[in-house]
Amino acid sequence: MKYSIQLWIFISAGLLIAGIFSSSFLMTGLALISALQAQRVFGKTYNSSYFNYKEIIKRRKERLEKLQKKTVEE
């Protein structure tokens, strides 16, 4: 999915450039809106804290500590 969103951004950027050179405000506007939407989707999907490796390592350590506490209590 990551690559499809990146492709969406690049195609939108290409349409934006084509719209600027052809002086088509409709094509430029649609390409700009599409590129911004793709960037927003990409940011929500891949730049969130879930995909942050430090957060993942922190969560794993917390889970390990919980498991160790459970085994000690039992």
Image (tube, grey):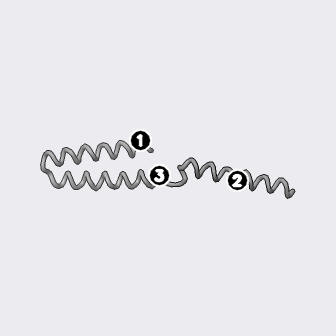
Q: Residues within 10 Å of mark 2 (few under 14, many from 20)?
A: few
Marks 1/2: CA–CA distance: 31 Å
Picture coordinates of residue 29, whole percent (x, y): 22, 55
3 or 1: tag closer to the N-terminus: 1
Judging by the rendered image, the residue that carries numbered circle 1 is 3
Judging by the rendered image, the residue that carries numbered circle 3 is 47
Picture coordinates of residue 58, whole percent (x, y): 63, 52
Give the quadrant of residue 74: bottom right
Q: Residues within 10 Å of mark 3 (few under 14, many from 20)?
A: few
Judging by the rendered image, the residue that carries numbered circle 2 is 63
In the structure shown, which secondary structural element does the residue marked by tag 3 occupy? loop
Question: In the image, what residue type sits under mark 1?
Answer: Tyr
Question: In the image, what residue type sits under mark 3?
Answer: Asn
Disc 1 vs disc 2: Cβ atoms closer than 8 Å? no
In the structure shown, which secondary structural element does the residue marked by tag 2 occupy? helix
Work out which quarter of the rendered image holds the N terminus and state it: top left
Marks 3/1: CA–CA distance: 14 Å
Picture coordinates of residue 47, whole percent (x, y): 47, 51
